[in-house]
Amino acid sequence: METQTVAELTEKYLMNTYKRAPVAFASGQGARLTDVEGKTYLDFLAGIAVSILGHNHPRLTAAVQQQAARVIHTSNLYLIPPQAQLAQWLVEHSACDQAFFCNSGAEANEAAIKLARKFGAGEGRFEILVADQSFHGRTLAALAATAQPKYHKGFEPLPPGFVPVQWNDFSALEAAVTPRTCAIMLEPIQGEGGLRFPSPGYLGTVRRLCDERGLVLILDEIQTGMGRTGRLFAYEHFGIEPDILTLAKALGGGVPIGAVLAKKHVAQAFQPGDHGSTFGGNFLACAASFAVVTTIEQDGLIQHAAELGTYLVDQLRTLARTHSAITEVRGLGLMVAVELSTETAPQVVDAARERGLLLNAVQPNTLRLVPPLVITRQDVDEAVRILAESLASVTQPVTTAVVGHGS
């Protein structure tokens, strides 16, 4: 099937909820994707930080094939061995004590919101403080927690009980706490908001505030988790522990799965009947996820992400010295942003795709690079070369040194 045919079928039969690039992929291997016409692309988007092992990884592929040949689904009315195994691994590798599985990041955040409210219900607490420019999902409660009005338009009234405050402003956060507050919900690094990093000490002061006021700290690590930042979880960089942790995206390496991890004193607020999911944590998803997490661990991909992330940022900052269009480069592990002086990021994305590099724009002037953790230095060199060509085609390079800033 040719790209044009796929595009025509998509336009006719699918709801118009996505602005899709004019490319249809047929296969992938490692950090490369091949479209239906046979053109190959270097993937520095990884399905929006999902395909953490790249494409067609032998362990993940084998796990899916083997599990599908045995049993795919029975529901949570019965014990599920791969689910128990995955929960054990996540708990033993995190600061949490128990897990709940669902199908997506939005579902994980919905469950976290319900858990925090149930925990605070005895004291009449239900409000959750959230940060401006956050992104927590598209379902109604997760959308209400997403403090970006552009996503709210047309879906009001949204569920009440979410109080937006300025990101990185601890005084504003502290002032917003009332007797109705049950939790503070944050991304340790804001992803869709433009890869915005917390100020030094900010998350530590938030943790202390939660301890002092008896609040639940929810960390949304749907994009930052599973080794993306050079640690298994981003909270490890900041010397804190969450009460509730949400995961998805890379957790399944492309197979849909979400998870909520929580400390026991919070987790026990959920009792049978309080929450559930028909598909959540089924045999296939958990077998796939267990293959992902054990591969990350056994292959040393977290340290690899830290090392390659440093190399990628260094190469991009070198590029910034000859391209005044780049005003800042910031990153942690393989979660990297390139800030531009003009709102031309979408055009740069298009130019890069035409040249065989996949990335995306999270803001009109911000490029996001979140490649698979299996990339090589040669992949980084190729990506930076293509990005340089793409910038030159959209903006005017100069010889004046422009040094990017990092976090």
Image: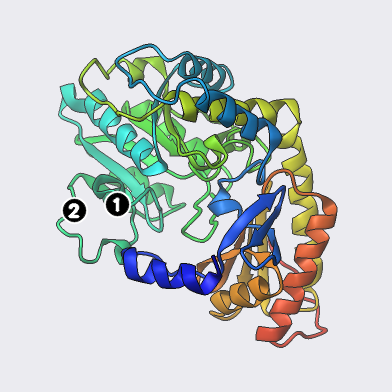
Identify the residue under disc 1. 143
N-term mark: 1 or 2: 1
> Can you say whether 10 is above or below 209 in the image?
below
Mark 2 is surrounded, within 10 Å at the Cα level, by few (under 14), some (14 to 19) or many (20 or more) other residues, namely some
Q: Which residue lies at the image location 44% right of the left edge and 37% below the top edge?
A: 219
**Placement of the N terminus among the 4 image quadrants:** bottom right
- Residue 264 visible at all: yes
Location of residue 350 (image quadrant) = bottom right
Amino acid marked by disc 1: Leu
Identify the residue under disc 2. 158
Q: Secondary structure at mark 2?
A: loop
Q: Which residue lies at the image location 41% right of the left edge and 58% below the top edge?
A: 133
Mark 1 is surrounded, within 10 Å at the Cα level, by few (under 14), some (14 to 19) or many (20 or more) other residues, namely many
Q: Which residue lies at the image location 45% right of the left edge and 33% below the top edge?
A: 207
Q: Is residue 2 left or right of residue 297?
A: left
- Residue 16 visible at all: no
Give the image location of residue 378, x and y in percent: 85, 56
Structural distance between the alpha carbons of marks 1 and 2: 8 Å
Amino acid marked by disc 2: Leu
Give the image location of residue 66, x and y in percent: 58, 24
> Can you say whether 307 is above or below 146 in the image?
above
Q: Is residue 397 left or right of residue 156?
A: right
- State the colouring used for the structure image: rainbow
Q: How many marks?
A: 2
Q: Are marks 1 and 2 in contact (CB under 8 Å)?
A: yes
Q: Is residue 232 left or right of residue 97?
A: right
Give the image location of residue 368, x and y in percent: 59, 61
Observer-nearest residue: 234 or 198?
Answer: 234
Q: Which residue lies at the image location 17% right of the left edge and 47% below the top edge?
A: 160
Q: Is residue 116 left or right of residue 303?
A: left
Observer-nearest residue: 400 or 275?
Answer: 275
